[in-house]
């Protein structure tokens, strides 16, 4: 494919395709995928036969609702019963190229495989993602995602190479050297988790390198929530002197499958590769436009271990209107709105760590890091939730400030957690995904 650096799009035809045409393409691909899953995988055949569903019953995109969603727990169980990859890994073994496990913090990881064609497709859509951030041939990309088993590192590497960038495959390690590379050869783009980006910004400040001394101008941040929160995005942008973009992916479906364009009007999905739905978490029914629901994703092209209607446990709100950038692919407005695996239930209310983050990072007196500690109260046996944050100046560590923080947390979370302040730098910094919940509740 011939790339034009002046073009707003990596692949204009597909990215601006009228929805009617796009949906026609999706239906063709869906029907192909459903048929090969039914014919080639006992896992899917059993699920279809149980409810009397045949591939021919999928006549429209709406018919996808007839297919029962599959959860991570079901995939995990399938891999335990039929090792190593479960019976939904339907590509012949000789076509397997890479193995990538899921990265959840709990339970046994779910392994997934990419065939050569899957690698090629992921490379294409990641190149498209980087292009939509503004990356162009000749950019120097510092790939600060962990390499190896995690999907984020490899996909960013492949995508950057595809658009003729110079890649520094450093991974999420060697923080001092990361800062040296910002200076020479002078990386222009960084991709990383938002928590690692904040850590790099903090270290830069400490070693006296100012953002205006380095050519870094753009960043793409994914692998965990954070960038969608305005206060966090601003801290990354100011700390590194860049324009920051949010993106989303998951090992089971594919990396970088939804990303922001330069309008930052939500995450555009790669709808030619993935079919996106949002459904009501209790009834499983399709959400009305604008309603927040669980993301349910279907691999339209994946060969290795395709998923039909994967119940992600992540929440989003979809907007099908054409974006100001000209792209027609659906957007998750405001990013990923909550990751259900992280949900905390406290005093009968639900909240997500991102809400705590939003509050903590709105106080200039506090550092960027925080923790949420869950313990069982000795006497009452009830859960106690404590938000631990870091003060920048000792003078902030007062009861008065703590009650101010508590009140701000109550306004955001509805319930009031306990609050604890620590000296700046005390909470452990992380180079992979931040683990911010410490669950020390009694399990009996
Ligand atoms: Zn757009």
Image (spheres, rainbow, N blue to C red):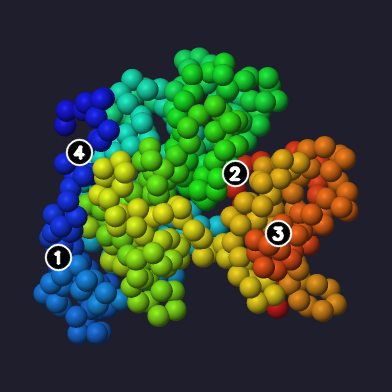
| SS type, badge 2 | helix
Drawn side of residue 172 relative to residue 99, left or right: right
* Mark 2 or mark 3: whose residue is earlier in sequence: 2
Q: Which residue is mark 3?
A: 409
> Looking at the picture, how far across and down is residue 32, in whole percent?
14, 62
Image: 151 above or below 283: above
Q: Tell me the residue that label 1 is attached to.
A: 31
Instruction: Give the label, 2 or 1, closer to the camera.
Output: 2
- Residue 203 percent coordinates (x, y): 66, 29
Image quarter of residue 286 = bottom left
Q: State the image coordinates of residue 142 (x, y, percent, origin top left).
A: 46, 28
Q: Which residue is mark 4?
A: 12
Image side of residue 67 versus residue 99, left or right: left
Distance from Cα at disc 2 to Cα at disc 1: 43 Å
Residues 120 and 343: in front is 343
How crowded pointer 1 is (Cα within 10 Å; few <14, some 14-19, many 20+) is rated as: many
Res. 231 mark = 2
């Amino acid at each position: 494919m011939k790339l034009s650096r002046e073009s707003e799009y990596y692949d204009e035809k597909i990215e601006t395709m009228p929805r009617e045409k796009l949906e026609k393409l999706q239906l063709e691909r869906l029907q192909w995928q459903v048929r090969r899953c039914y014919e080639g995988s006992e896992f899917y055949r059993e699920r279809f036969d149980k409810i009397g569903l045949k591939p021919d019953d999928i006549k429209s995109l709406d018919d996808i609702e007839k297919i029962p969603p599959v959860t991570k727990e079901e995939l995990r169980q399938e891999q335990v019963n039929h090792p190593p990859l479960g019976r939904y890994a339907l590509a012949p073994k000789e076509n397997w190229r890479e193995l990538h496990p899921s990265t959840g913090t709990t339970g046994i990881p779910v392994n997934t495989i990419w065939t050569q064609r899957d690698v090629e497709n992921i490379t294409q859509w990641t190149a498209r993602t980087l292009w939509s951030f503004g990356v162009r041939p000749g950019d120097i990309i510092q790939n600060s995602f962990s390499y190896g088993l995690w999907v984020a590192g490899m996909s960013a590497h492949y995508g950057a190479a595809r658009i003729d960038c110079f890649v520094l495959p450093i991974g999420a390690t060697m923080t001092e050297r990361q800062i040296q590379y910002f200076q020479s050869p002078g990386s222009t783009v960084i991709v990383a988790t938002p928590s690692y980006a904040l850590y790099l910004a903090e270290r830069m400040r400490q070693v006296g390198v100012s953002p205006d001394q380095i050519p870094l101008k753009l960043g793409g941040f994914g692998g965990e929530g954070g960038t969608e929160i305005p206060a966090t995005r601003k801290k990354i942008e100011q700390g590194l002197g860049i324009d920051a973009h949010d993106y989303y992916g998951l090992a089971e479906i594919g990396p970088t499958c939804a990303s922001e364009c330069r309008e930052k009007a939500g995450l555009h999905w790669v709808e030619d590769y993935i079919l996106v739905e949002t459904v009501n978490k209790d009834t499983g029914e399709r959400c009305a436009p604008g309603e927040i629901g669980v993301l349910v994703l279907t691999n339209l092209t994946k060969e290795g271990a395709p998923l039909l209607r994967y119940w992600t446990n992540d929440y989003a709100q979809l907007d099908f209107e054409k974006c100001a950038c000209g792209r027609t692919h659906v957007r998750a407005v405001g990013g990923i709105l909550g990751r259900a695996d992280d949900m905390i239930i406290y005093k009968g209310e639900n909240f997500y760590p991102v809400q705590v983050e939003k509050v903590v990072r709105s106080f200039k007196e506090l550092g960027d890091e925080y923790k949420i500690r869950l313990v069982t109260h000795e006497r009452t046996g009830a859960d106690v939730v404590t938000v631990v944050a870091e003060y920048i100046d000792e003078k902030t560590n007062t009861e008065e400030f703590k009650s101010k923080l508590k009140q701000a947390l109550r306004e955001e979370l509805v319930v009031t957690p306990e609050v604890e302040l620590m000296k700046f730098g005390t909470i452990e910094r992380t180079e992979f995904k931040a683990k911010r919940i410490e669950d020390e509740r009694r399990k009996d």
